[in-house]
Image (spheres, rainbow, N blue to C red):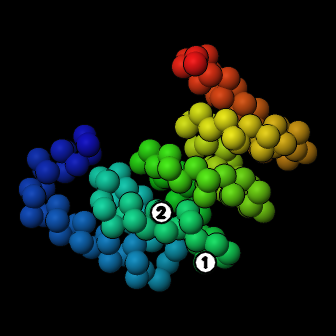
Amino acid sequence: MLLKDSADKWLGQEDLRGIASRLRKEMNEANEVEVRREALLGLVRVKDPDAVAKVIQLVEAPGDEAKPYRDLAIRCAGELGLKEKAPAVRRHMSDPDPAVRIAAMVVLSGWGDQESRAGFAEAAKSKEPRLRQAGDMALKRLEQAKVASPK
């Protein structure tokens, strides 16, 4: 909320609403993927309801529809604490794009998602160094979460 509080202070509430409105438009209508991604990220940072809905839509979208946004949507789901979307995020641990797989492992391990352990272990054995490192780190984070909150 610090970002939103700072924006309120420097821009004023009216200007902030105008900026959010413009970002919402760019998030949905911009021709460039990079512009859409940045607009989504900016709106997620202030927990804009339209952006939250967009993140959920992108995380749950099957196929290639959300491909250019999937890694970002997964990271945003983590930032927003959307733990109830863990099953949808878990499906992306087998995505062919390593950036998506890594984003899923980071978010799921941050949530302490024990159901993802087998996927993390599989990634830790990968020949791809980035996936192997992400899998190792995810397993370590799960162990840390287990120790931090024993049953």
Please tell me whether mark 2 sits on a helix, a strand or a loop. Answer: helix
Residue at the extreme front:
151
Q: Position of residue 47 (x, y in %)?
A: 32, 54
- On the picture, is 79 further left or further right than 133? left
**Residue at image mark 1:** 65
Q: Which mark is residue 56?
A: 2
Q: Can the viewer see residue 28? A: yes
Q: Where is residue 111 in the image (x, y as percent from the top left)?
A: 55, 37
How far apart are labels 2 and 1 at the CA level? 13 Å
- On the picture, is 61 further left or further right than 125? left
Q: Where is residue 121 in the image (x, y as percent from the top left)?
A: 81, 37
Q: Residue at x 50, y 50 (%)?
A: 84
Amino acid type assigned to the residue bearing label 1 in the image = Glu
Q: Residue at x 56, y 66 (%)?
A: 60
Task: Give yes or no for contact between labels 2 and 1 (Cβ–Cβ under 8 Å).
Answer: no
Q: Residue 19 carries which label?
A: none
Dot 2 alpha-carbon crowd within 10 angstroms: few under 14, some 14 to 19, many 20 or more? some
Amino acid type assigned to the residue bearing label 2 in the image = Ile
- Between residue 72 and residue 7, name the one nearer to us: 72
The image quarter in which residue 110 lies: top right
The image quarter in which residue 126 lies: top right
